[in-house]
């Protein structure tokens, strides 16, 4: 079993995060071109400064990333390096972030709809954590769905 360390992103690791995002950008609506990636980088830096950018590491390799917003109870970005998928990295990131939110908060995340194959893995992951389907939305010209995790106790996710 690999030892996965989850921690807040450090300022000197932003470029490494962006390299991972470039690997997976085609899986995320809104990250198709360099200007979108430039905007994403600005958001990432703000999140890093607010300590709302979780990174997952195996040794010195960045293998997973997660952005979240405590002010609106939202997980805004979760990605795992393609070579490290199905190794529990996304689950470890989700366990860590859920405990950052107030236990009475309803946490939201937006992902692909059930009829989009790109949503199969993320939806399965979120449903395993107790997220439930909510409203249908269109984000970055892509049909998506909001999933909600209702209030819970911290102990259930530790």
Image: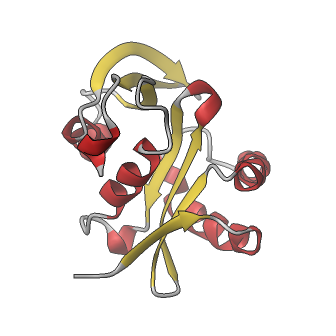
Point 53% across, 66% down: residue? 7
Q: Nearer the viewer, residue 82 or 8?
A: 8
Q: Say whether residue 117 is visible.
A: no
Q: Position of residue 99 (x, y in %)?
A: 43, 45
Q: Say whether residue 37 is visible.
A: yes
Point 27% across, 23% down: residue? 132
Q: Position of residue 82 (x, y in %)?
A: 38, 68
Q: Nearer the viewer, residue 30 or 100?
A: 100
Q: Position of residue 41 (x, y in %)?
A: 74, 54
Q: Quadrant of residue 81?
A: bottom left
Residue 117 appears left or right of 9 = left
The correct choice, above or below, for 68 with respect to 108 in the image is below
Q: Quadrant of the N terminus?
A: bottom left
Total numbered circles: 0
Point 25% across, 27% down: residue? 115
Q: Position of residue 27 (x, y in %)?
A: 45, 49
Residue 41 appears left or right of 136 = right
Colour pattern of the rendering: secondary structure
Residue farthest to the bottom, as pictured: 59
């Amino acid at each position: 079993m690999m030892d996965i360390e989850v921690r807040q992103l450090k300022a000197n690791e932003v470029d490494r995060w962006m390299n991972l995002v470039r690997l997976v950008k085609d899986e995320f609506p809104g990250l198709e071109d360099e200007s979108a990636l430039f905007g994403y980088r600005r958001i990432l830096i703000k999140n890093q400064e607010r300590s709302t950018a979780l990174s997952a590491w195996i040794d010195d390799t960045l293998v997973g990333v997660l952005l979240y917003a405590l002010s609106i109870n939202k997980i805004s970005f979760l990605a795992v390096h393609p070579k490290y998928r199905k190794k529990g990295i996304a689950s470890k990131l989700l366990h860590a972030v859920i405990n950052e939110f107030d236990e009475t908060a309803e946490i939201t995340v937006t992902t692909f709809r059930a009829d989009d194959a790109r949503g199969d893995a993320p939806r399965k992951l979120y449903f395993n954590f107790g997220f439930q389907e909510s409203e249908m939305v269109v984000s970055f010209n892509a049909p998506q769905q909001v999933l909600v995790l209702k209030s819970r106790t911290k102990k259930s996710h530790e």
